[in-house]
Image (tube, rainbow, N blue to C red):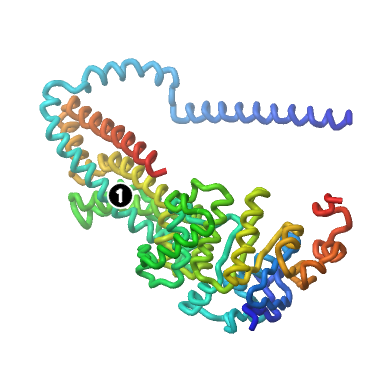
Amino acid sequence: MEKRRANEIQIFKKRKLVFTAAAAAVILLFWTASFVTQYDTLLGLSSFPRAFAWIIKSMVPNAKAIERLPNILKKLAETALLSVAVTVCSAICAFFFALLGSKTTKANPLLARVVRIVAAFFRNVPDVVWAMLLMFSFGQNVLTGFFAMFLTTFGLLTRTFIETIDEVSNDCVEALDAAGANYMQTVFQGILPSSIAEVITWVLFMIETNIRSSTLIGILTGTGIGYLFDLYYKRLDYPSASLVVLSIVVLVILLEIISGGIRKVIL
Amino acid sequence: MPVLELRNVSKTYNNTTRALHDVSVTVEEGEFVSIIGPSGAGKSTLLRSVNRLVDATRGVVILDGQDITRVRGKELRRVRTKTGMIFQHYNLVNRLSVMENVLHGRLGHKSTFSGALGLYTEREKEQAFFILERLGLTEQAYKRCDELSGGQKQRVGIARALMQEPKLILCDEPIASLDPNASKIIMDYLRDINKTMKITCLLNLHQVDVAIKYSERIIGLTAGRVTYDGPAQKLDKKTIYEIYQSNEGELITDMKE
């Protein structure tokens, strides 16, 4: 008994030692990295106030920027609608693709693996890179942005839908199989109703994400709100450029509120 | 003519795990049969080999006079409509209404198109209401299934099975997740269905006392082999210990004395 208790105390001591060693390692790593990159923590921190002062001085929207608001809003609406269109299109494609990749509903194991690999490939190439690649074939065009976002959204949604389908459908698929339902009936009567809430949640989330990334892609492809930002930025018209950013932030927050409401209703 | 006949059925998973070993069972029309045995004895596998959710490795399954061991596609769907199944975890589509879940029992009879879109005939809907009324679920008909209690969910499961107009109902641990009160209600309904509608019932049960009380015949399954097959009354203590491979005083049923 005595010996066992001594052992247990020993375990606590050991745990403490491990934590101390880990903390020391992290600090050492930080110090080494700072030294190699010649990063000065103090200088970095002390430049914050000046940076903020500059932002406030030169980036707060002024009267001239406000004049441009209608134009900005028009482009913003265009971008938002494009994101909605992209996300909905890719979600529909991704759902049927995910059926082939899911463990419970796959048509055959080889195809399921191919689906997973294709989805991983589309997902792991950033949409900006897709946009650059697709620019060669489509040029500076809305279509380029559309396809770039379509591919990454498709990859990501396929992956998440596969997980959703795996999660929700084991039990009800078995029951519907036992009742003599065929594949399409099981999908539409069992899997779709079971997973629809999560599917919608993900679609809403991807619409938000795509509005954000379409800004960046727009800079490359010269379309939408990104083009406008780029234009003002390069003209050194910082107040207008920051108004563009602010309007995007407001739109995304608005969307978050709306989708939060929708989620509350459907869940 | 027996409604179900298993002839020397064996099932091996992944060429290694042997779930069933040379099982031969005959079930006559209108019987109420319970299968008992320890966990992992192959009870679920046996039940699922009847509606081909599990394919037997060897042996023959004859349902309603037809060899169904190798049927496929459309014919398999048709065969499956003859057996309703009730599950331990109810296996309902929780986001749909009670009514829709009950109507799922008709899917095997319907075309792909009308089944997928959920287009049911008036007659089917009336029948669903009739069954719900019988199971005391009229008030719940339009509720979503995730609003129901466990006992109610299991009654929806029974309603879905009845909707198939089956010859045979397979029950995989129908009361294992229910409290004693709901368990009694479910078992009473199953017995009632068996007696009045003449639907054969084949159950997996963990509760030996329930099996003895409700069923006419009991099948004991131990490590994939049938170790007892006979009337419920003749099942004595010694045989129960043999089925569960345990010694006297080790089972929960021993607690009564």
Q: Looking at the image, which is closer to me, B141 or B196? A: B196
* Vertical placement of residue B230 versus A246, above or below: below
Relative to B123, A245 lies left or right: left
Q: Is residue A163 visible?
A: no
Along the line of sight, the residue nearer the viewer: A19 or A3: A3
Picture quarter containing residue B187?
bottom right
The residue positioned 38% from the left and 65% from the top of the image is: B116
Residue A22 pos. (x, y %): 62, 30
Q: In this image, A130 relative to A79: left or right?
A: right
Give above or below for B234 relative to A28.
below
Callout 1: SS: helix
Q: Residue at x 35, y 37 (%)?
A: A261
Residue A267 position in % (x across, y down): 42, 43
What amino acid is found at the position of numbered circle 1 in the picture? Answer: Thr
Is A40 on the left or on the right of A229, as rendered?
right
Residue drawn at 62 percent across, 62 percent down: B190
Question: Residue B251 falls in which quadrant of the image?
Answer: bottom right
Give above or below for A91 relative to A207: below
To which chain does the residue with label 1 belong? A
Q: Nearer the viewer, residue A191 or B109?
A: B109
Binning the other alpha carbons within 10 Å of mark 1 as few (below 14), some (14 to 19) or many (20 upward) gives: many
Residue B85 visible within the image: yes
The image position of residue A147, as x and y in percent, is 27, 53
Task: Name the image quarter holding the N terminus of chain B.
Answer: bottom right
Q: Give the residue at x 66% y 54%.
A: B184
With B177 as the anchor, is A200 left or right in this view?
left
Q: Which residue is mark 1?
A: A87
